[in-house]
Structure formats: C-alpha cells, structure tokens
Amino acid sequence: MSPMPKACVIGWPVAHSRSPVIHRYWLEKYGIAGHYESCAVLPDDLPDFLGSLGAKGHAGGNITLPHKEMALSLMDTLDETARRAGAVNTVAVKDGKLCGSNTDIYGFVENLKNSGAAWKRKGTALVIGAGGAARAAVAGLAGEGSRKIYVTNRTPDRLRRFMAGLAHLNAPLEPLGWPDREDVLPEVDLVVNTTSQGMDGQPPLALDLKKLKSTALVNDMVYAPLVTPLLAEARARNLATVDGLGMLLHQAAPGFALWFGRRPEVDQGLRRAVEEDLKSEK
C-alpha cells in the first residue's frame, strides 16, 4: 500500500503562509488522502531540511521567504522557470533527487490574464522592488513580450545586483532611480508592486499615480490587505486593478499537481476560503 502523499511549505517565519489553506481545500475538494503542513525552518537549517525531505516522506513542498534564492543552489535539478527567475519556490522529490521550479512566474502571469483587456501583454511595465517576487514578475513579463520593463528600488546597490542577476534573460530591462519612478508613469501600461509596502503593519508604497494614463493596469502582489493603499488610489482614479491573491492561488496549482497527481482548479470557492482565513486574523 502506498503511503499517504504529503507536502509542506518551508519558510522563516511560516505561520502567515496561506499555502496550507489552499492545498487542504483542494485535498478535500478532490477527495485525496494527502497531507499538507507548515515547516518553520531557519536559513542555516535549510540545506539539511531539504536534504532529508524525501526521507521524511514528503513528495515536495513550497518554499517561501526568505529561502527562495538560497534554495536554488540546493536543488539537484532546475527547470527553465527556476533558471529564468533565479529562485525556487516549488520543489518535488523524484527518485530521491530535489527538482526545483518557479511557479511564481506562472501565477503572476495567470493573475494578470484575469484582468482581461486591461493588461497589454506587450506594453511597458514598471516593476517596483528587487527581490524574489520582482524576479518572477520580470521573468514573466519578459516571457510575454513586454516592450520595456522599468525596474526601480529604494537601494541603488540592490537594484544593480538585481539587474546583473537577470542579464541572462536578454530582456528589455531598464533600471530606474527611485527619485525618477514617477517620471515614467505617462508611458507605462502596467505598474507592479513586488515590495511589502502597503502590507498590514507596513507603510504605504510611496507612489503618486496622478501621471499614470487612464488605460493603465495596477497590480499589487500584497494580498493582506486585499485592497492596499496603492490599489485604493488606483480605483479612486478609475484605473483597472489586480490584487495579489490571484497570484498566490495560481502559483499553487502546478505544485499540487506534482505532489498529489491532479491538476486543481482555481475557483471562487478557493478564493473565498482564503479570504475568510485572512479575515479571521483580524
């Protein structure tokens, strides 16, 4: 008899993760006798934890902050998505080997697609931030044929390292000094916030949207709260918006298929379940 398949989310801290809500919803919906758990793992302990993942009976897991970039060097194999993003957020154990991928790219693009005609695939984008989430955004936009991708960050050195780390994409990237971030808004079709600014307990993102054209789309990867100050301002200006929850839900689907053998559907029931979980913390 085969053991019950199980997977986990690995982070430090990890209690805030909604991945257990998502995967347990699908396990129940599809009647799969599987298990999904949270594992708080210190950065120094990540190599040993991942190395023993299969021995613990895990089919794989999600990797969240702050481990996504460190995990890249700990995989036995990497797929194209992980190489493009320079980060791993999903790992599968196959024949005792750790296989890393990056489903954040897929989740990000699928979320934008849900905005309908508001997203101009080949338009100009402004990506704010220079971390793992920004890597996924840039890789996704480059793959979709964006004409130009401005990237800005408060810290110039971090921005320079970020740009150097994505040189392999051969994408139309253009670094932008933080003081100049609003100057490009008249030509931008998409604004993406990949930082934690605007998250519960964090100050709002410092970005005035008054120069943004009326046809632009504003996407905030933050999903707690669902309507961040950035999205609230965009809606007040009658701009199209996309919140961060859709990306979280869509990025989870490929991993579930790997570990539990069924490609799940991202439906309204799942979104409601995660929204209720978010509300329960308040």
Image (tube, grey):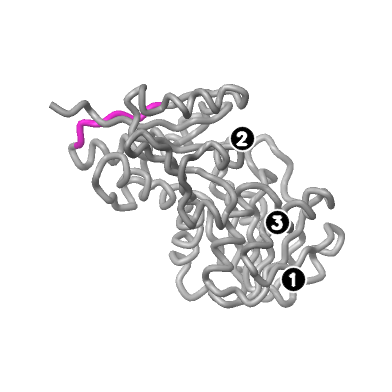
Relative to 41, 7 lies left or right: left
Estimate the x, y position of residue 202 in percent, counting from the top left. 70, 38
- Estimate the spatial distance between the alpha carbons at disc 2 and disc 1, rounded to whole Å: 31 Å
Is disc 1 surrounded by few (<14), some (14 to 19) or many (20+) residues within 10 Å? many
Task: Classify residue 199 by image quadrant.
Answer: top right
Mark 1 lies on residue: 185
Image height check: is 171 above or below 7? below
- Which of the two discs, 2 and 3, labels the residue nearer the N terminus? 2
Residue closest to the far right: 179
- Which of the two discs, 2 and 1, labels the residue nearer the N terminus? 2
Q: Which residues are magenta?
A: 32-37
The residue located at (75%, 68%) in the rendering is 174
Say whether marks 2 and 1 touch (CB < 8 Å): no
Of labels 1 and 3, the one closer to you: 3
Of labels 2 and 3, the one closer to you: 2
Q: Of the numbered discs in the image, which one, if any, rests on residue 9?
A: none
Mark 3 lies on residue: 128
Image height check: is 32 above or below 101? above
